[in-house]
Amino acid sequence: MSSRTVIRGGLVITASDEIHADVLIEDGRIAALAASASPAAGAFTADRTIDATGKYVIPGGVDAHTHMELPFGGTFASDTFETGTRAAAWGGTTTIVDFAVQSVGQSLRQGLDAWHAKAEGNCAVDYAFHMIVSDVNAGTLKEMDLLVEEGVTSFKQFMAYPGVFYSDDGQILRAMQRSAENGGLIMMHAENGIAIDVLVEQALSRGETDPRHHGEVRKALLEAEATHRAIRLAQVAGAPLYVVHVSATEAVAELARARDEGLNVFGETCPQYLFLSTDNLAEPDFEGAKYVCSTPLRPREHQAALWRGLRTNDLQVVSTDHCPFCFTGQKELGRGDFSKIPNGLPGVENRMDLLHQAVLDGHISRRRWIEIACATPARMFGLYPKKGTLAPGSDADVVIYDPHAEQVLSAGTHHMNVDYSAYEGKRVTGRVETVLSRGVPVVTGREYTGHAGHGVYTPRSTCQYLT
């Protein structure tokens, strides 16, 4: 049976437009938009009407960097695909792109199949996968071609974590050369992991074991050096490059320089680098462990460069790098040795609200909010216009957002499966009220009405920004 929903009276905001319009949804897709009070809008008929008067009507968020159930440091990220995608829905995110992991000695296919098994039938919202490439060899390179053909069109490599995910420059170059041929996009964790390990060893030998030393050894210059090296390797290979979780002023400068040269180089940052700092890492009584992630939090003065990069489009995307570990029993693994603290922060539920607060704080415009959180990640990773916008034919992933509601972020009220909030006690204005995923209400007037298994796997085309 056909189903029709109309959303009336809201301010529709996309990356390109703001208009008071009514939105007609039919069979899970956007069927039409018409200016509110126009004859066309008046002609919309539906089984269900949602009143969005005084609210924003925005596309569902696209979080292009999450790690559900990721194995790391002898434990696993605490959000499953079920709990993590439910929390995403609560936060106005209707699509995640998670990272399947190739383990050393295994094929890409084995890693991808394992992640499909984790996610299938468990997700509250739609999902897709990137592929972490940990073992570059002739077989891996051939598999990259096959994965691109079937909709896994981006591959993450690590210049950090020797012995775990690390690739050397030769392996990186080979993968980049392959992606230059098959249309894939290389995503890079850009930190000089070999040098960092030396600094970690030296810090521990001096008895510097507290969480704050995690940030001190993972120096901004080593992020900038690796970013520069990745850019030049990509240039040699003739390949595009997407640098994940950019945190440092010096790394932004490397991206800006490359883009000024006309290179297909892109950058992502995350809310933790925009709103948190080394002050959090230095919190006493091991509380700083809650904020251990890599790249690490930086001194507060780096935030201005990140906001500027988002305004000038030297940074294009804000993702979360959602990788939660509970303080009790997981982060505590690193008591007495900061290098054993599992790296990662929770955030999939907070991103849209924090970026709306950034609008109110004057950092970005409303349309830029939607651009960096919805439209650009969808375009970057081959999901647009199915995802990331409100246009006829797009999936009806729609958020009714109350821009005036006030809330206090807290572990006591969030829905992520983690025992702390990285933003505990932070007051923000703006809150998700209702969320539709492919036209189906998954959050209705601040009540969860979704279910595991509604979310479906979504193959992707290649990056839509390549020149």
Image: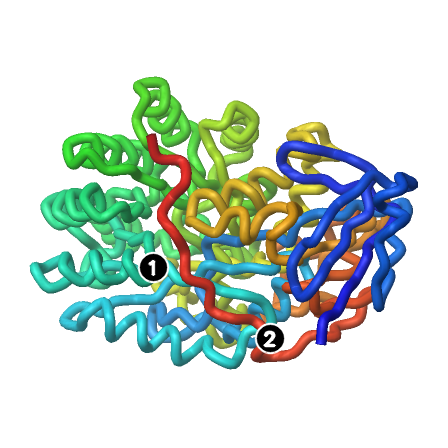
From the viewer's perspective, tell me whether residue 383 is left or right of residue 205. right
Tell me what residue is drawn at x 41 percent, y 40 percent: 464
Position of the N terminus by quadrant: bottom right
List the residue tagged with mark 2. 454
Tell me what residue is drawn at x 41 percent, y 29 percent: 252
Count every numbered label the image shows and give the total. Answer: 2
**Structural crowding at the residue carrying mark 1, measured as other residues with C-alpha within 10 Å and reported as few (<14), some (14–19) or many (≥20):** many
Query: Which quarter of the figure has residue 28?
Result: bottom right
Kind of residue at badge 2: His
**Structural crowding at the residue carrying mark 2, measured as other residues with C-alpha within 10 Å and reported as few (<14), some (14–19) or many (≥20):** some
Q: How far across and down, in percent of the image, does residue 160 sit?
A: 26, 51
Q: How far across and down, in percent of the image, does residue 162 sit?
A: 20, 56
From the viewer's perspective, tell me whether residue 287 is left or right of residue 354. left
Question: Is 173 located above or below residue 64 in the figure?
Answer: above
Give the camera-side residue of 305 and 123. 123
Question: Is 329 located above or below residue 351 in the figure?
Answer: below
From the viewer's perspective, tell me whether residue 103 is left or right of residue 13. left
CA–CA distance in space, label 1 to label 2 = 21 Å
What number is the disc on residue 73? none
Give the camera-side residue of 158 and 153. 153
List the residue tagged with mark 1. 152
Give the camera-side residue of 23 and 223. 23
Question: Is 297 located above or below residue 143 in the figure?
Answer: above
Kind of residue at badge 1: Val
Tell me what residue is drawn at x 39 percent, y 45 percent: 244
Upstream in sequence: badge 1 or badge 2:
1
Answer whether residue 228 is visible to the viewer in this image: yes
Q: How far across and down, in percent of the image, does residue 221 sit?
A: 32, 32
- Residue furthest to the top in view is 260
Position of the C terminus by quadrant: top left
